Amino acid sequence: MDKKVRVAGIQNSRVLGDKDTNVPRGLEWVRRAADRGAQVIALPELSNTGFFPQHVDDSYFDLAEEIPGPTTERFANLAVQLGCYIIVPVFEVDAIHRVYYNSAALLGPAGVIGRYRKVHIPAWSRGVEKYYFAPGNLGYPVFELPFCRIGITICYDRHFPECYRHLALNGAQIVFSVNNTASQRSHHVWEAEMIATTSSNGIFLIQINAAGHEGESVFHGNSAIVSPRGEFIRRVEDGEHVLDAELDLHDLELARRQFSSVRDVVWRDFGLDGTQASHLLGDGSWGRPSVRNTHPRGDQTGEAAAPTVSRIR
């Protein structure tokens, strides 16, 4: 496995509820990132619709798509053309059970590799996500690419350290956190969470926010790429940007050897037996299943049987 990987996050603006505008814009941003050599590229949360859960409006359910679906197919075709991997957050519908999720699809040269469904769904004065989204039922899958292992979290998930600990214990080297964050409170803790998340789990973090105005929301940007030691590799403020960097996985291994909180975890607290330790400590034993999951409600393929929670129509 190559020890270096070039990653990118897209901090861009969208037009609320306008997929016909947002998808072509997203495709163009991905092309720009790939032109700079990015191998894995992530767009912000709800990249094709914008952040519509600001008000209750049943017409927004018409924006939901299956995975694969129209949006992911266009990005998958681009991934084939460019030879890269793309994380595309979308409003997903499980058409069989009529359950709706805030999801992120992982696409590559072979098509749809997998997906993550946002587990933690907030409810506060500036958003009504619980009206639209069921909590994700796929756990915290880790995806093996030819050059690295990645995990995905979505926005509010970042306030829950357990997400990142599950991903780290399950072998993730790089985590992409895709966001739509506008609140001043979140802005205040944004940087502190990135430092704590990376240094306590020994992972690279690419934390991507949206930019611009959507309805009543003004997204503050401030996307960043952070090292396993909690050091900022790249960061931007507001406005639209391609945020990219070359990450050296050897540096991750050194960081885990020098300060390895994952080594010192009491495994039974996470329902594990400790056999996972070898691939966390950088000894080269990477021959594990391509998608793995430590969450009790997810299976070993990154999919789950049937939804157990409801936003059902």
Image (cartoon, helix red, strand yellow):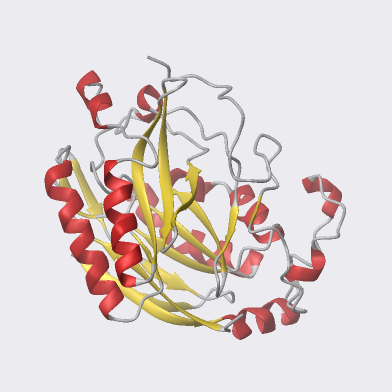
Instruction: State which quarter of the image contains the C terminus.
Output: top left
Q: How many callouts does the rendering have? A: 0
Does the rendering let one see residue 222?
no
Q: Is residue 31 left or right of residue 151?
A: left
Check the image and name the residue furthest to the top: 313
Query: Residue sitting at 37 percent across and 35 percent down?
Result: 66
Q: Residue 230 appears at what percent x and percent y?
A: 54, 73
Please tell me whether residue 61 is drawn above or below residue 101 in the rendered image.
Answer: above
Q: Residue 166 appears at what percent x and percent y?
A: 67, 52
Please tell me whether residue 90 is drawn above or below residue 80 in the rendered image.
Answer: above
Instruction: State which quarter of the image contains the N terminus.
Output: bottom right
Q: Is residue 91 left or right of residue 163?
A: left
Q: Nearer the viewer, residue 145 or 227?
A: 145
Q: Is residue 59 left or right of residue 198?
A: left
Does the rendering let one see residue 90?
yes
Please tell me whether residue 50 is drawn above or below residue 244 in the rendered image.
Answer: above
Query: Residue sitting at 72 percent across and 62 percent down?
Result: 288
Q: Residue 203 appears at what percent x and percent y?
A: 59, 69
Q: Nearer the viewer, residue 31 or 42?
A: 31
Q: Residue 146 appears at what percent x and percent y?
A: 55, 72
The quadrant holding residue 243 is: bottom left
The quadrant holding residue 191 is: bottom left
Query: Residue sitting at 83 percent across and 54 percent down?
Result: 267
Q: Nearer the viewer, residue 23 or 231?
A: 23
